[in-house]
Image (tube, helix red, strand yellow):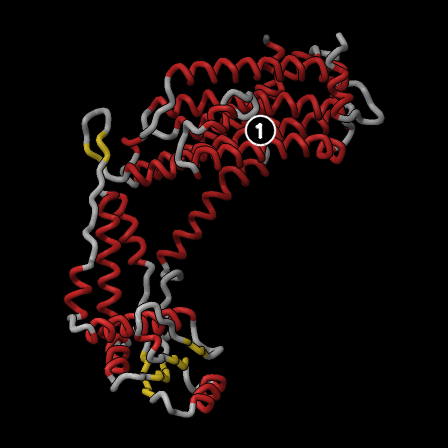
């Protein structure tokens, strides 16, 4: 046991205490967030663009009412009023998220810059020279030519917008929204109705959503955390498992290629060496899980949603990390012991990695896209050991639709059985391949090694 621990400590130090790992896992994320924070504080993300100045030509089949409505909507004051209305609607929607929504809205407003465009409307009659107007659009004299016909004013009608190459996307959207809303106003007035009154009456009411927690508290933000939490769990788990397993594969290949493996085996048995390497690199993966998971916890606390996450879910995340890591690391240890160089290892690892990625995608589609953690595909994958940690991490994160206790126990037993079988198979392959050089075996060749004692 002492030799296994010494090997594990050596593996951990050889990976986690290197400048490259410290820079990539710790310093680089801090630098990135620091640069983004400094740029935001300096206002680099909120520099105000110059407002657009120009004209549009509008083919107006009415007596001028349509052009008046469009000009009124493109008025700078009307643009500001529309923006304020959008802000009010956004605040109403984000109010359902409580403190988190207010923080998000304040961040958005701090980076939002707005200067109203100065766009004038030139009315054209239906019998005007449209070819000349199109040439003015091509030359950039006009931002756009909007062709409205009598059919456009009928329900289901459409209009044509010919825009200049120099027109900005936001200005095109502004112009089209103004014209389309104005066409609706003309239709309403033609039907004898007041357009402002109708628009006020059809405005939908806001919704304030709260989540009743087990502790009896009412907390806002349940829907958002329900959407975000499963993906966050899967990402954290994948980073920790694949990174730790990747380091294990590379260290095994390097030690075998440089003949260091032979020196190590003079002091420890193959089983002790493999176990120590798996534990050591597992500690590296766990360190990454703590680092990035800690950032996630910090964000959850800042956005006032930490109390929505049951502590038991974090325990399950740790269990599924151990389960997934030992399965993936055992496979990598077996591959690393059987090859002579990194290129050969990548060729053998490719199908395995592809299978893991496929499992993750199947888990996301069967759980997230169906919005059902108890779908048939999700439940079936939960009993397939390589998929168990990834799919179950998605399922247990559905705090509003928890997995039954019996299924948690059953899938955990299946996953642990798969983990033990993976370690056992990897140990047999490791013992045979660690001192074998020459032509690397195929996947079928590795399976044949399992018969060796």
- Relative to 40, residue 409 above or below: above
Residue 7 pos. (x, y %): 62, 17
Tell me where residue 334 sits by quadrant.
Answer: top right
Residue 256 pos. (x, y %): 75, 24
**Quarter of the N terminus within the rendering:** top right
Relative horizontal placement of residue 283, taking residue 190 as reference (left or right) = right
- Relative to 416, residue 103 above or below: below
Residue 269 pos. (x, y %): 70, 10
**Quarter of the C terminus within the rendering:** top right
Closer to us: 255 or 373 = 373
- Relative to 399, residue 97 above or below: below
Residue 288 pos. (x, y %): 50, 31
Task: Say if residue 262 shows up in the picture.
Answer: no
Relative horizontal placement of residue 339, taking residue 293 as reference (left or right) = right
Q: Residue furthest right?
A: 438
The residue at the point 46 percent across, 20 percent down is: 319
Tell me where residue 3 sits by quadrant.
Answer: top right
Q: Which residue is mark 1?
A: 244
The residue at the point 32 percent across, 65 percent down is: 113
Relative horizontal placement of residue 182, taking residue 231 as reference (left or right) = left
Relative horizontal placement of residue 252, taking residue 16 as reference (left or right) = right
The residue at the point 49 percent across, 86 percent down is: 139
């Amino acid at each position: 046991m002492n030799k296994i621990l010494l090997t594990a400590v050596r593996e951990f130090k050889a990976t986690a205490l290197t400048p490259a790992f410290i820079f990539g896992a710790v310093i680089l994320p801090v630098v990135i967030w620091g640069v983004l924070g400094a740029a935001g504080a300096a206002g680099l993300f909120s520099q105000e663009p110059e407002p657009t100045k120009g004209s549009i030509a509008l083919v107006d089949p009415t007596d001028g009412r349509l052009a008046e409505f469009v000009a009124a909507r493109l008025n700078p004051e009307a643009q500001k009023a529309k923006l304020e209305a959008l802000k009010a609607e956004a605040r109403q929607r984000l109010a359902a998220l409580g403190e988190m929504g207010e923080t998000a809205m304040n961040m958005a407003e701090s980076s939002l810059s707005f200067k109203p465009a100065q766009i004038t409307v030139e009315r054209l009659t239906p019998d005007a020279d449209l070819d000349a107007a199109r040439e003015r659009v091509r030359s950039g004299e006009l931002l756009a030519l909007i062709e409205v016909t009598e059919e456009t004013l009928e329900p289901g009608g459409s209009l044509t917008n010919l825009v200049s190459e120099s027109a900005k996307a936001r200005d095109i959207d502004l112009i089209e929204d103004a014209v389309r809303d104005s066409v609706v106003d003309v239709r309403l007035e033609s039907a004898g109705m007041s357009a402002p009154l109708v628009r006020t009456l059809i405005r939908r009411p806001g919704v304030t959503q709260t989540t009743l927690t087990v502790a009896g508290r009412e907390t806002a933000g349940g829907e958002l955390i329900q959407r975000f939490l499963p993906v966050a769990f899967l990402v954290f788990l994948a980073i920790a498992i694949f990174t730790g397993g990747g380091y294990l594969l590379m260290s095994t290949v390097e030690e075998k290629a440089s003949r260091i493996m032979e020196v190590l085996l003079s002091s420890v048995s193959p089983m002790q060496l493999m176990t120590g390497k798996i534990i050591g690199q597992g500690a590296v993966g766990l360190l990454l899980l703590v680092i990035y998971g800690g950032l996630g916890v910090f964000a959850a606390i800042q956005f006032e949603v930490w109390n929505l996450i049951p502590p038991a879910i974090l325990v399950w995340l740790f269990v599924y990390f151990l389960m997934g890591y030992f399965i993936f690391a055992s496979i990598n240890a077996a591959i690393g012991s059987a090859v002579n160089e990194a290129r050969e290892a990548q060729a053998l690892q490719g199908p395995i990695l592809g299978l893991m990625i496929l499992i993750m995608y199947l888990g996301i589609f069967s759980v997230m896209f169906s919005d059902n953690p108890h779908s048939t595909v999700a439940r079936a994958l939960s009993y397939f050991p390589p998929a168990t940690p990834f799919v179950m991490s998605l399922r247990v994160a559905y705090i509003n639709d928890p997995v039954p206790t019996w299924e948690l126990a059953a899938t955990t037993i299946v996953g642990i059985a798969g983990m033990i079988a993976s370690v056992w198979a990897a140990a047999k392959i490791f013992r045979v391949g660690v001192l074998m050089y020459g032509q690397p075996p195929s996947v079928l060749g590795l399976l044949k090694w399992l018969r060796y004692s």
